[in-house]
Image: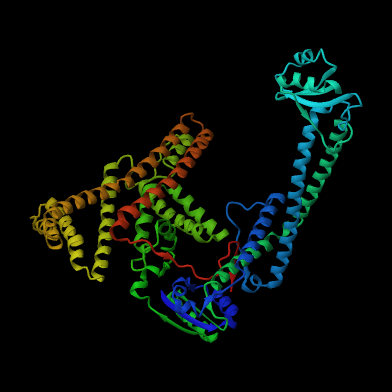
């Protein structure tokens, strides 16, 4: 990375930001450090932009796309079908205006539907309130006559209306039950006005509560019918508004292009707000990869900017963003590295160092030609047809590579969906058939276990070698000798001793084990350091190497599960039943191993391997760039 400092005329801001966006390799830094300096804050202020308005537009377009998916029944599928568009069409203002008009039209229809749905809820609630009273042929607005009082009321569903009438027997009042449900009973009360207070006292123990229908005229049935007609009109209006949305279904691609353009505008506006300006000139600091510096230089010279590029100072190292430099083999491993954590800028790129081991380990654990073929085909088809970007693109690329490794290891172990071919041939012809194999998980388990731990030992030694080189580069020679060289001598000495060679090398290694703490520690720590070093290194290396036994365990588990399902399918002796049970079981086994092998492989890399040399905590490089979701922009 190169540290950029750029000054330009404020009038060229929009053109500068647009060209930086198209270039896609410059990250503009937050100006907080500069604004904290009184000398800078007195002269310059943050730039402004239409960032808030753009975010509002993005929300509107996203809502419009969701509405099209809901009302027009448009399906996206598992992967987005990316299309290509020229840069000129991508930035065409006329296309954006047309898409904006569609967005506003759909937004208006959605607001109308929302209003109608709210009105529908109110009408439905009012109709439900009238439902229990429909059998009552009494106008709802009737409150009584000159001498009588008419009241509608409710009481709990468990109320005995016979007992209630009996309580009113000695009064000039009558109670009629209009309807009932589990919660309430709906009653009509008629009483003489002179006995209103007495009747209320008698009804209080029965929890009788008066009900009023303000604004209603006519009977409950008449009002319910009127509300039903209004509900039908409401539903028709909702359908009409939904049809208006469906009519814009053909504009979905235009809306997606508009959304991608707005996301690019977000990047430009974010950059604009990181500029410092006094209205006449503008200034910003940022980062650009060294390999792209010539392109940045050409752009800044063309726009008559004053600029400089320099290597980051030592104190700036923690703030330097990290961009991984990849090729076709290591690029898919970005998925693993980013899931763990990016390396610190002063550390190494782990992808080239991890790729051979990760791909090999995955193949060892899965180890089946059928599964490997499925992985490779799935990755290839998705990459060719959908061209996914980001994590999904890395995952498909990694699936391709691991599929090849899985197929090769399956060929070595003679596995194709377990022993699928063996069972299928036996059911159809009655003959014996088996794929050739160099070794098999069930018969050569101990060999595979030893080989797995040997491969793990190789990876650990490689991690130590990387650590050794890093320490030499940083001037920590003694650390490199006592941490790595010492234990290489111990490992070599143990190997030679097993082979019957005089343990001189082992003795030299043990001398260095003792000498390390004596040289590096002080006082009593010289003694305790010896025991601490021995304990930590011996148990640490032993545990790390033993952890690689999972390579054998997952290979064995996957093979056994596949053979169990094949055997179960072959028991009835019918080829059709065999195919159903075997393929269903192998599908389940494949799905479990696809995830399980990834998790265990990830653990070996992140704990056993990265623990030897990896320093994480890097900031991701986030340049201003056109990064569309639905389209590939062709310059």
Residue farthest along the right direction in this orientation: 146
Does residue 522 appear to the left or right of 205 in the view shown?
left
The colour scheme of the drawn protein is rainbow
The vertical placement of 327 against 583, above or below, is below
Q: Of residues 437 and 395, which is closer to you in this image?
A: 395
Q: Quadrant of residue 220?
A: top right
- On-image quarter of the C terminus: bottom right
Q: Residue at x 71, y 68 (%)?
A: 97
Q: Where does residue 586 sit, x and y in percent of width and height? A: 47, 41
Q: Where does residue 208 sit, x and y in percent of width and height? A: 74, 23
Residue 436 seen in this snapshot: no
Q: Quadrant of residue 343?
A: bottom left
Q: Where does residue 476 sit, x and y in percent of width and height? A: 22, 68
- On-image quarter of the N terminus: bottom left
Q: Of residues 36 and 444, which is closer to you in this image?
A: 36
Q: Of residues 519 and 247, which is closer to you in this image?
A: 519
Does residue 49 appear to the left or right of 6 in the view shown?
right
Q: Residue at x 23, y 51 (%)?
A: 541
Q: How many marks?
A: 0
Does residue 461 appear to the left or right of 1 in the view shown?
left
Q: Of residues 632 and 90, which is closer to you in this image?
A: 90
The vertical placement of 329 against 361, above or below, is below
Q: Residue at x 54, y 72 (%)?
A: 271
Q: Where does residue 415 sit, x and y in percent of width and height? A: 40, 45
Residue 387 seen in this snapshot: yes
């Amino acid at each position: 990375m190169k540290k950029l400092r750029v000054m330009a005329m404020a009038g060229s801001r929009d053109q500068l930001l647009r060209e930086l966006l198209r270039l896609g390799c410059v990250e503009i830094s937050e100006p907080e450090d500069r604004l904290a300096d009184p000398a800078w804050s007195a002269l310059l202020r943050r730039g402004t932009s239409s960032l808030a308005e753009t975010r509002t537009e993005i929300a509107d377009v996203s809502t419009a796309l969701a509405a099209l998916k809901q009302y027009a029944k448009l399906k996206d599928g598992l992967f987005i079908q990316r299309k290509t568009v020229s840069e000129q069409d991508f930035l065409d203002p006329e296309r954006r205006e047309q898409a904006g008009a569609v967005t506003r039209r759909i937004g208006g229809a959605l607001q109308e539907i929302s209003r109608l749905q709210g009105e529908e809820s109110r009408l439905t609630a009012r109709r439900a309130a009238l439902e229990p009273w429909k059998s009552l042929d009494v106008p709802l607005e009737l409150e009584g006559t000159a001498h009588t009082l008419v009241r509608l009321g409710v009481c709990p569903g468990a109320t005995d209306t016979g007992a209630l009438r009996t309580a009113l027997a000695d009064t000039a009042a009558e109670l009629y039950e209009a309807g009932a449900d589990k919660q309430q009973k709906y009653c009509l009360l008629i009483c003489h006005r002179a006995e209103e207070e007495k009747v209320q006292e008698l009804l209080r123990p029965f929890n009788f509560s008066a009900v009023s229908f303000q604004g209603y005229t006519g009977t409950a049935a008449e009002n319910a019918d009127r509300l039903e007609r209004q509900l039908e009109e409401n539903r028709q209006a909702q359908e009409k508004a939904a049809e208006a949305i469906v009519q814009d279904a053909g504009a979905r691609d235009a809306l997606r292009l508009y959304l991608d353009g707005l996301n690019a505008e977000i990047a430009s506006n974010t950059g604009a707000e990181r500029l410092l300006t006094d209205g006449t000139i503008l200034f910003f600091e940022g980062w650009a990869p060294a390999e792209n510096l010539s392109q940045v230089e050409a752009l800044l010279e063309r726009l008559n900017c004053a600029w400089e590029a320099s290597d980051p100072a030592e104190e700036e190292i923690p703030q330097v963003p990290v961009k991984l430099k990849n090729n076709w083999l290591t690029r898919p491993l970005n998925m693993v590295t980013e899931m763990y954590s990016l390396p610190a800028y002063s550390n190494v790129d782990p992808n080239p160092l991890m790729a051979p081991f990760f791909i090999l380990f995955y193949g060892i654990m899965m180890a089946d030609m059928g599964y490997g073929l499925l992985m490779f085909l799935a990755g290839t088809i998705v990459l060719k047809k959908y061209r996914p970007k980001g994590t999904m693109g890395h995952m498909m690329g990694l699936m391709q590579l691991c599929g090849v490794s899985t197929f090769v290891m399956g060929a070595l172990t003679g596995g194709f969906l377990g022993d699928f071919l063996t069972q299928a041939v036996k059911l159809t012809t009655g003959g014996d058939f088996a794929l050739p194999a160099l070794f098999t998980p069930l018969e050569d388990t101990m060999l595979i276990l030893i080989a797995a731990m040997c491969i793990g030992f190789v990876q650990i030694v490689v991690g130590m070698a990387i650590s050794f080189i890093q320490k030499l580069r940083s001037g920590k020679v003694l650390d490199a000798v006592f941490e790595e060289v010492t234990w290489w001598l111990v490992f070599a000495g143990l190997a030679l001793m097993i082979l019957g060679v005089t343990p001189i090398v082992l003795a030299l290694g043990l001398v260095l084990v003792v000498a390390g703490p004596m040289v590096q520690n002080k006082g009593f720590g010289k003694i305790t350091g010896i025991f601490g070093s021995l304990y930590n290194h011996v148990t640490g290396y032993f545990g790390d190497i033993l952890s690689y036994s999972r390579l054998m365990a997952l290979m064995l588990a996957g093979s056994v599960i596949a053979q169990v399902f094949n055997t179960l399918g072959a028991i009835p002796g019918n080829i059709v039943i065999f195919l159903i049970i075997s393929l269903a079981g192998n599908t389940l086994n494949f799905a479990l191993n696809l995830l399980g092998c990834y998790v265990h492989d990830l653990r070996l890399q992140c704990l056993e391997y990265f623990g030897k040399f990896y320093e994480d905590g890097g900031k991701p490089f986030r340049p201003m760039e056109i990064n569309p979701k639905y389209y590939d922009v062709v310059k």
